[in-house]
Amino acid sequence: MKKVLLVLVAVLVFNSVNAQWYSKLRKSDFSSDYKIAYALGSGNDYPYIDVSLFIRNRDSELEVFVSGFGYFSSYSSKDHDLKLSIDGGEVYTAKNLSVSTDNEALFLGDFISDSGEVVSIEFILNLMKEGSRMSIRTYNGSDYNTAKFTLSGSSKSIDFVLKN
């Protein structure tokens, strides 16, 4: 019985550590202040084991991006791919991806569902608020990398960023 309780406590502690979403108001001396929420995911391909998802609202402009998935050359952005699935459901493919200036992050826009319907990033964020886990797979022209994110706590962090 003690072993069962110990395992249960260990699982709960592990899940609570991995279930962390962070949200902050960032102050800037050079541009306007902005709100940001982010989550740390876990990848399955070394060295891409520390991946992050960011949601930022700067000057009422929403930016959603991922980092830690490897290097994305800016000159071949049409060869990049990002797919996500929430709770193992429908797969959404990013319609337009932009590469950061350091080639380490992908900025997300609209998505296309399995049925061909175009959905907004706001639609995806609402799915995230209702879900419990999300998988993201990227392709950088030569390698696929997959990561998992817990969505526990995402609703509060996403609402913090979206509300003025």
Image: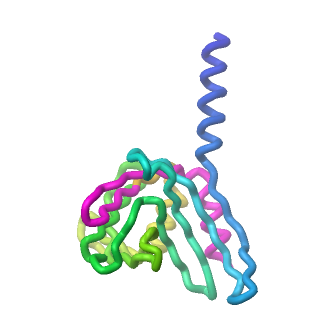
Name the quadrant containing residue 119: bottom left
Residue appearing at x 30%, y 67% in the figure = 81
Name the quadrant containing residue 26: bottom right
Q: Name the spot of residue 88 as percent of width and height, x first.
A: 37, 49
Horizontal arrangement in the rendering, residue 105 relative to residue 76 (left or right):
right
Q: Is residue 4 magenta?
A: no
Name the quadrant containing residue 6: top right
Q: Quadrant for the N terminus, please.
A: top right
Q: Tell me where the magenta segment starts and ends, as one range.
A: 136-164
Residue 74 lies, with reference to residue 10, above or below; the image says below
Horizontal arrangement in the rendering, residue 59 relative to residue 65 (left or right):
right
Residue 101 lies, with reference to residue 133, above or below; the image says below
Q: Is residue 150 magenta?
A: yes
Coloring applied to the structure = rainbow
Q: Name the spot of residue 83 as percent of width and height, x first.
A: 33, 62
Residue appearing at x 36%, y 69% in the figure = 72
Camera-side residue of 69 and 148: 69
Q: Quadrant for the C terminus, please.
A: bottom right
Horizontal arrangement in the rendering, residue 60 relative to residue 118 (left or right):
right
Horizontal arrangement in the rendering, residue 59 relative to residue 84 (left or right):
right
